[in-house]
Amino acid sequence: MQLIRHIQFKRAESIAEPAPTDPNPAAAEPAGNVCPAGKAETVAKPRFSIAGKISSGIRVDGDLILKESVCIEGEVFGGVSAEPGVLVWIGGGGIVHGQVKAEYVMVDGEALGGVEADCVIARSSARIKGGIRYGRIRIDDGAQIEGEIGPLTGAR
């Protein structure tokens, strides 16, 4: 099994979690406040600088250990883990065949080995197989989850 210890990219891209589409702002907490600790009115929306992308058509065989936030739109055959403060974003066409462990995980694509994170966002197009362990979680309508969903116990 190949182990990629660090991927370095040239271009950084900033993303923020978009606001909910609910026309009644009182009905939903702002999406950016779903995972950070604290009250909604006192916590700023988290911003992540995406260091790079594993584009569609790219296949990675082996585990990834990320030091910076990455968007995965290709296919990873192995686990993905990240250092604290790093976002693992599985984009709409992305597939991870292994467990994803990070502080922040956002899934638009497929996580086929489960997710363990302090903050999990499963968007409407997400497919997660293998369960979820979370500190805080948001599951959008339409997301497909197969497996147990439960809170993190102890340290990650």
Image: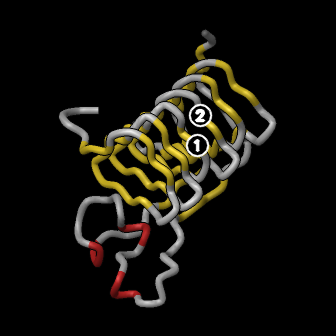
What residue would you read off at disc 1?
110
Q: In this picture, is 138 found above or below 20?
A: above
What's the residue type where badge 2 is placed? Val
In the picture, residue 95 is in which quadrant?
top right
Q: From the viewer's perspective, is 85 left or right of 143?
A: left
Q: Secondary structure at mark 2?
A: strand
The spot of residue 34 in percent (x, y) is 36, 64
Residue 50 lies left or right of residue 136; in this view the side is right
Q: Can residue 116 be seen?
A: yes
At label 1, counting other C-alpha atoms closer than 10 Å, the crowd grade (few under 14, some 14-19, many 20 or more) is many
Q: Name the residue beneath numbered marker 2.
A: 96
Q: CA distance from mark 1 to mark 2?
A: 6 Å
Q: Picture coordinates of residue 88 (x, y %)?
A: 52, 43
**Image quarter hosting the N terminus:** top right
Q: Earlier in the sequence, mark 1 or mark 2?
A: 2
Q: Residues within 10 Å of mark 2 (few under 14, many from 20)?
A: many
Q: Is residue 17 above or below residue 11?
A: below
Label 1 element class: strand
